[in-house]
Amino acid sequence: MSLRSICRTLTVALVAWGMLPLAAQTTDAGQSSTDNHFAQPTSSGSAQAGGYAGETKPAKWEFFVGYSWLNLNQSIAGTKAGFPVTFKLKDAQGGFMVDGSYFFNKWFGITVDSGGHFGDTYDFDEALIGPTIRFPTEHLQPFVHVLGGWTRLSPGNQNPSDVFGLAAGGGLDLKVARHLNIRLAQADYVYAQHNYGAGNPKYVDGARLGAGLVFLAGVGQELPVSASCSVDKSEVWAGEPVKATVSPKNFNPKHTLKYDWTTNGGKVEGSGATVTINTTGVAEGQSYNVSAHVTDPHDKKAVASCQTTFATKKRLPPTITCSAKPDSVVQGGAITIHSDASSPQGGPVTVAITSTCGVNGQGTDVSVDTANIQPGSCSVTCTVTDDHQLTGSSSTSFTVNPKPVVKPPEPPPSLVLRSVYFATAQPTPRNPNGGLVKSQQDTLTGIANDFKKYLAVKPDAKLVLEAHADPRGGEEYNQKLTERRAARVKSFLVEQGIPADNIETRALGKQHQLAPNEVKQSMEDDPSLTANEKKRLTRNMRTVVLAANRRVDLKLEAPGVPEQLSQRRYPFSAADALSLIGGRETPKVAPKTAPKGQPRKGGAKSKKGGAAGKKK
């Protein structure tokens, strides 16, 4: 070990020893003012400090002096006395460490470390600085640190090398006195970039172990014990429990404390740091005190007391408002007496009603049947009672009117409905308002006139228009076609004064086809057709069936009235029947005058100019 290393180490030790008394005096003096803080009252209640007990504040300064052993892992090649030689940097059994640490708080500080190590083949010196973290407990204090700074390696076969180095590790101190710890062990990993050229490692690393004494300065005084009291509610109703809690501070955590509670506002229930105050029977609108006395049976000096307060609220009577809904009915109608009642304290309430007309009941909504109440005014009194028998009242009234003489409703007029028919593919997309021939317009006009009279009696009645198509088109085509047919019939009825809201349309495409036997039966039941006309129509049955399915059925729906469906009778006798069935109308031709004694051509067969005589 070099003389320079010895001098530097001794200087650090002397400075540390010189600062020890000053640091201890300064910190102790400052601690006295800090101790006074713990006796101040808290926001929850007043506190009184007692004796000193509990933990001691850790030292602000720590100075370590001890033995150190170093072992490096590398070998250095060089020359000694002119001969090449390689030294293994192993045990440096002779060494010491001196360091000083200043802590900014209980855990974190900064350390200045210095040490010298000398062995048979090399010397190693260091002067390092870095952060330290300690973990103080009652008897032991572990710590860790990371240090960096100057290191010197002086092997016996090379010149000394000064480079930057690191040491990282930790240790464990044992507390033996107020100002003295024993460092049981300290272990560090050491690293430095000492490079002696070719054939030598570019760095050295190894382990540093140490043990010794730690002198403490700035050790805080024992903190004074204290206690603070608090309650969970500052205001309660009489009879409502109050939870009181005492928080002791700086007592020895290993000792079981004793708690004594007193109060002038009820009865203390329970024991320990938290108790319940039973306020049953205490006066309302008053303030009461709760006090706690904390002692340590193992330390007579550890005594602290505290006090807090709570108050009881004064109860107010409940409030109520009531009303009759509705306030006027015809005899036999229903009335509800509604009450809004509550207690300012938030407790439960009950409501009762009485009246001058024999109506009585319980609850916030009382239903009244006026069937047995004589016409006239009835006064009602509503009374509310809370859980402490405080009451409040309110009043209202309602009127019962005599039953009026009601005439029975007039029956709706009769309504004759007929289905209407369209020609093939009518109406078209280009002319959606066409396709309704004159004969079918006349049919709808008559229906509209009758339905307006019907609505005067049954305003909620409605006509349902169900549009159909023959089966020759595709699904989508027939659907669109029947939508246009239903819309055209609806628009015509609206033009005649029928409200649109009383008309419903249904486009059924080719879903509901009339069977040939149904169409034939309809022809047989048609009194306007002669036997010969029926025979001719039967021969063209396929065309007739197609025509009969190009229709819009009308259905009457009204509440309380049986459903009525339009009569499906094809207008064979109409002047425009050929346009509907697939031909066209031609003007009637006057029959030629036959010679006297000869019958006119056509005879009875030309009597009708409709579809029966034209369609084949």
Image (spheres, rainbow, N blue to C red):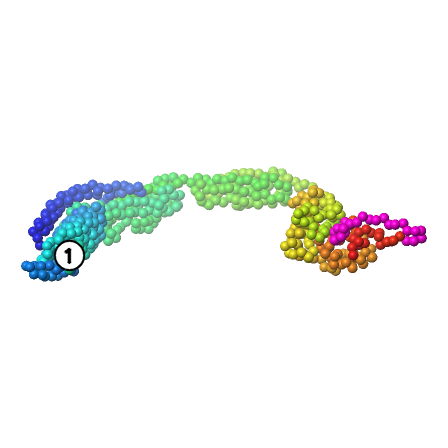
**Is residue 86 in view from this perspective?**
yes
Q: 105 or 98: nearer the eye? A: 98
In the image, what residue occupies the spot 66% across and 44% down? 500
Q: 596 or 155: nearer the eye? A: 596
In the image, what residue occupies the spot 21% across and 43% down? 35
Q: Position of residue 319 (x, y in %)?
A: 48, 39
In the image, taking residue 116 as reference, residue 561 lies left or right, namely right
Q: Which residue is mark 1?
A: 197
| Residue 165 sits inside the magenta stretch | no
Q: Position of residue 14 (x, y in %)?
A: 10, 47
Badge 1 element: loop
Magenta stretch in the rendered image? 576-599
Q: Is residue 285 above or below residue 148?
A: above
Number of marks in picture: 1
Q: Main secondary structure of the magenta part?
A: loop
Which amino acid type is marked by label 1? Answer: Gly
In the image, what residue occupies the spot 20% across and 55% down? 169
Looking at the rendered image, the quarter that the C terminus falls into is bottom right
Q: Is residue 566 above or below residue 74?
A: above
In the image, taking residue 108 as reference, residue 468 lies left or right, namely right
In the image, taking residue 212 as reference, residue 580 lies left or right, namely right
